[in-house]
Amino acid sequence: MSDAVALARRRQAVHGWLLLTPALVMLTTFAFYPTVATVWTSLFSRGTRRRPSEFVGLENFERLFADPTFWQVVQNNLIYAGVTIPASIVIALVMALWANARLPAQSFIRGAYFTPTVLPMIAAGNLWLFFYTPGFGIFDQIGGFFGAPSVNWLGQPETALLAICLVTIWKEAGFFMIFYLAALQTIPPDLKEAADIEGASRWDYTWRVVLPLLMPTTLFILVNAMINAVKLIDHLFILTKGGPSDASKLILYYIWENAFAFFDAPAAAAMTLLVLGVLALVAALQFFVIDRRTHYR
């Protein structure tokens, strides 16, 4: 009997590993191996045909910390994240509350909110490039109607980064709205009826009932928004290419520039590791601090 039990357990273990094999192969190919390769590359110097790469330890990280362009890019990314993340989440929540209400043409409103999400970022960049074009763009046309002067939104450092932020907010708010809308539709209607019986206002019901129940969704959206803050660079290629004077250059674009324009793979690998480390710390903070304040049903 014991041999039969042991054989059954071995078969079960083999069956489990066979089920895990496809996921392990995918993770090893696209996650584990690239991470190890990035760590290894960051420890070597940039190689050329005459001068092969050499082990330099943490020299690439020291060179990054001494690079003023790197700190300018970090500052840009912090501003970009600080503007786009809360704005996208708040606008998405407002749109979801409105789209979930009983309104005429509700399906049209939901479709209109979600339309920017289905557009490729390159197409969205070209669309907004027309909006921002000095003298001919939509914004200048509207401003000119009220007597405002023409503004080169993408061509001056004071407005270039904020113009990029506006495109991202427009693109992401509709995507986040879908998650909020799905979460709102899972809230039992009995809670609204009980709130009405107790005489609670719409604001009290939203603040004390709806928002706490949406906290798991908000946490999920917050994590995704943090990742997107260092992941979305497609529109930079169309709108500014990081200019003018690095005013709109973000960290992932700078990584791409070092790797494929300057052919400095070790510097790009070092920056990639720094980004992964910061994202890991932020995710840990979100899950261990904010998650404790989150109500799960």
Image (cartoon, rainbow, N blue to C red):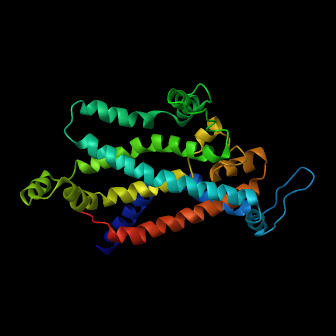
Q: 89 and 143: which one is in front?
A: 143
Give coordinates of residue 263: x percent, y percent: 79, 48
Quadrant of the rendered image containing residue 5 = bottom left
Q: Is residue 239 left or right of residue 266?
A: left
Farthest top residue?
136
* Residue 84 in view, yes or no: yes
Q: Is residue 130 above or below residue 188?
A: above
Q: Is residue 59 left or right of residue 210?
A: right
The residue sitting at 56% across, 49% down in the picture is 231
The residue sitting at 40% across, 33% down in the picture is 115
Q: Is residue 33 left or right of residue 282?
A: right
Give coordinates of residue 65: x percent, y percent: 73, 66
Farthest front residue?
147
Give coordinates of residue 79: x percent, y percent: 57, 55
Farthest bottom residue?
2
Quadrant of the rendered image containing residue 159 = top right
Q: Is residue 167 above or below residue 275?
A: above
* Residue 18 in view, yes or no: no
Q: Is residue 77 left or right of residue 226?
A: right
The residue sitting at 47% across, 53% down in the picture is 85
Give coordinates of residue 259: x percent, y percent: 73, 49
Where is the N terminus found, in terms of image quarters?
bottom left
Count the marks: 0
Farthest left residue?
197
Q: 120 and 155: which one is in front?
A: 155
Where is the C terminus found, in terms of image quarters?
bottom left
